[in-house]
Amino acid sequence: MIQATKTKKSPQREINEVRNYGDGTRSHQTIRDNAAGRGDRDVSPTLPIEMTEEISSPLFEVSWDQDRQFRMDPATVSALLREQVPVLDFVKWAVTSIEPGSAESVLPLNPQSTNQHFTHQAALCVLAGDYTGGIALASLLSGWPVIGVHPVSSPQSVSMWLLRVEIKYMRPSVTDCTVTARIDPERHDRIRKRFLRGQAVVEAITIEFHNGDSLIAEATLTYFARQSEKLRSEGISTTQINSLYSLKLTSSAELIAGVRASENGRLFQDPFAAQMAGQHGVAMANRFCERTPQLGGMVAARTSHLDGALSKFLAAGGRDVVLLGVGWDMRPFRLSLPAGTRVYELDFPTTLAERNRRLSQLTLTDPQGVTRSSIPIDVRTMSLTSVLEDILPHGAPVFIAWEGMSMYFSEKEVRQILDGMLPVLRDPDSRLWIDLIDRQVVEHPEQLPSSVQNFVRGMQILGDPLTFGPSSVADFMCSVGLRSLEVTLSDVCFPEGTDAVYSSYKFCVASALTSTETAVPSTVLETWIWGGAFKTDTVKDGRSGGNW
Ligand SMILES: C[S@@+](CC[C@H](N)C(=O)[O-])C[C@H]1O[C@@H](n2cnc3c(N)ncnc32)[C@H](O)[C@@H]1O
């Protein structure tokens, strides 16, 4: 048994504290702390429930007081939810109290929340009930940020959604409506234990709606909650996958296609992006870009830089192209690929199936003489080497594009994935294209200009936190057996990119180090790489034109 006093080291988390909510003004303060809520204070986490060693969960526990103060403070939760779901802000819905396993909120009677016929009240009550019940459930999962509510700064988060609603309306609400959710205390331990073990929690919660003392409606709302990482491990399976999670899986591809649709024509041409993104992708892109306005420029810059690098490879005679995490990338259709080009499109099976479904709805024909193959993979759990060695011809140069992904993986995973590519990059004309974010952006955004901090927080709020970036691209590449031939800061690609975010976003073209090169220590290597035959016009991590 773990002793109740045992201290667990918890990951760094950022919780956005929102103060002064309620009077119309809000002030946001980012608190960087260990284990949401402990700040710099030396507080040993308490373990309120009996945990056995078999529970190998990374969950950390904080005392309820600390958890309430930072993660479950009613004002903070209200403000975060009102930010995410604007209709809650419109009707001035607010959380008034949160205790372990229970929550109370108020759907106020105001012009926005009523009409002459009471016809929209029912839907608003469901909305208020949904969030109140969700908060009651989240209150039991100490310290864990809920995706879509709290800023998420690590892969450890709760994915939660509503599965079922049964509601009975007794009479319309004619005054402020108090919404209460209470989970039977006898169920608290069971919920926590299932969650800690990584199992799905499915919980029916009773919600009551009152006008003063009189009950006006009663509901039972059933929720699903699980550690987000546990859902992810089901990504490769097409049979077990939850339909909501499978949509979530394709949403990043959809989002990026939506961003490309809005950037189309600036630095690149992608006439298919809008159709591939669909209405949802375009709406999501608008929302993301509203919050993180640099995203459009970053995607435009990387699209154009990668187009250029790939064209160079093809012009030099290369014909094998791997698009790793292909998403809704339309390069095979929008670039004039020479006859004989073989494109390997790698992604989750669910994503590939959806990609091909969308492609079949466009009036497209595969470019003449070009073959495309869909290769299902989960790069986190499968061996990239064996997948690539199975599909690629031996002895031919290959171009691997790993676009828009490295920053969402852990360093260990990125190293493993790059290591998995090495065997097929051995040909001296093979190339890897990868985009990377600076380590400082991931680890110490507070030391960077406010635009970078806002960008980082925006990604956290949207549930796509930046989790990895090297401090030196050249060193990092070298440490995984790769030689950076070119490192380009994204702002080089477009003159108006003056925001500090752009200079911390880099594109690298690399090839494999030969066995003798691998032995060169990194300090010497700096000079060797940048002063040597491959590159004479670039300083380390500098602005470059590539001569590779
Ligand atoms: C941000 S999107 C980028 C898509 C595309 N590269 C682009 O720039 O348009 C990330 C892509 O990586 C895929 N992906 C994420 N994790 C993956 C994994 N573990 N294995 C395979 N593909 C993955 C997603 O399904 C998605 O299509």
Image: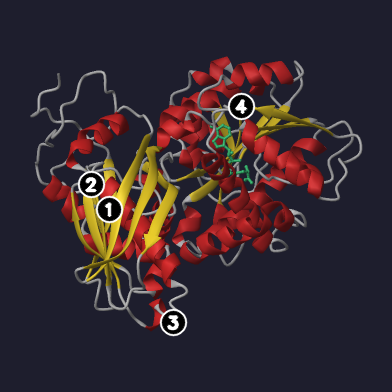
- Distance between mark 4 and mark 2 Cα atoms: 34 Å
How crowded pointer 3 is (Cα within 10 Å; few <14, some 14-19, many 20+) is rated as few
Could you classify mark 4 by the number of other residues whose Cα lies within 10 Å: few (under 14), some (14-19), or many (20 or more)? many
Q: Is mark 3 within 8 Å of ligand 1?
A: no
Rendered-image quadrant of the N terminus = top left
Which residue is denoted by mark 1 in the rendering? 15
**Residue 63's x, y, as percent?**
13, 43
Residue receiving disc 4: 377
Residue 381 in sight: yes
Q: What label sits on residue 481 in the rendered view?
A: none
Compute the Cα span from label 4 to label 3. 52 Å
Q: Disc 2 marks which residue?
A: 36
Which is closer to the viewer, label 4 or label 3?
A: 3
> Marks 1 and 3: which is nearer the front?
3
Amino acid type at mark 3: Asn
Q: Amino acid at mark 4?
A: Ile
Residue found at x 35% / y 29%: 198
Query: Does the residue tagged 4 have its C-beta within 8 Å of any atom of ligand 1?
Result: yes
Q: Secondary structure at mark 1?
A: strand
Cβ atoms under marks 1 and 2 closer than 8 Å: yes
* Alpha carbons under labels 1 and 4: distance apart: 34 Å
